[in-house]
Structure formats: C-alpha cells, structure tokens
Amino acid sequence: MSDRVEAAEVAFIPVGPLAGVTPDRPAIVLVGSYEVAIFIVEGEVRAYENACPHQGGPIAEGEIEGTNVTCPWHAWTFDLRTGGMAIGADFARLRRFDARVRNDMVEVALEPEAI
C-alpha cells in the first residue's frame, strides 16, 4: 500500500471560444455559481472570480494596464499573472480558477483554487 495520496483530477468545463477574449477585453462567464472573468495576460489565459475581494466590485469592468487590472469601484489594483495585489501589499487576492485552451475553446475549472 502506498503512502502517497493522488491529487484529485480537476474538472473543467468549456466556457467559450478563445477568440471571444482579447488582452483589453475580458470575457465574463458563469461557472457553476461563480461569475468568472477570463483574461489574456502575456498570451496566457487567466480566470478569476469577477469580484474584487475588497467589496465585490466587477473586476472585469476595471481598467487593464499591462498585466494589471484596477477595480472600477475603489481602485484596488491586481496583477493578473498572480491574482495578488500589484502594489506592495499582499493582503488581498483575486480568487483564481485553473484555465486552459483546448481546440480553441477556453475551459475553466469548476471550483476556484484553494487559497
């Protein structure tokens, strides 16, 4: 008997074509009970819950500048590569979902990553 525990396979669902997402315009999709924002960051697909951890502002409606997005409600800025705060602090993070592209279709994990 092995002492090693196998990691559970992450379940993904298709949410839309990759062509529907551009670096300056994220797509917003429903994944189970979550509203998820799909971003293209440095050529990679990133998926985050469409809610700023401060007061739930719609992060996909924020201003994107380089690899950062700024919440439209209270100007909290996040690094889209990591989901963490972009400026000096790391007390808040965007809730991240695994995302991938298969056959030009964006797929997102059914549940966010554990924090």
Image (tube, rainbow, N blue to C red):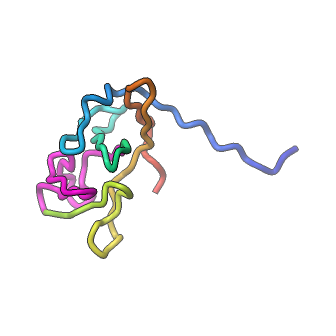
64 is within the stretch colored magenta? yes
Measuring from the top left, give residue 24's x and y in whole percent. 19, 44
Give the residue displayed 23% in from the left and 61% down from the top.
54
38 is within the stretch colored magenta? no
Q: Quadrant of the N terminus?
A: top right
For this view, does 75 lie left or right of residue 8? left
Q: Quadrant of residue 109?
A: top left
Instruction: Note whether 115 is above or below 48 in the view shown.
Output: below
Give the residue displayed 22% in from the left and 63% down from the top.
77
Measuring from the top left, give residue 78's x and y in whole percent. 27, 61
For this view, does 63 lie left or right of residue 96? left
Instruction: Note whether 50 is above or below 15 in the view shown.
Output: below
Give the residue displayed 51% in from the left and 32% down from the top.
11
The single residue placed furthest to the bottom in the displayed view is 88
The single residue placed furthest to the front in the displayed view is 43
User: Start and end of the magenta stretch?
Assistant: 46-74
Q: Nearer the viewer, residue 68 or 8?
A: 68
Q: Nearer the viewer, residue 18 or 14?
A: 18
Give the residue displayed 36% in from the left and 55% down from the top.
81
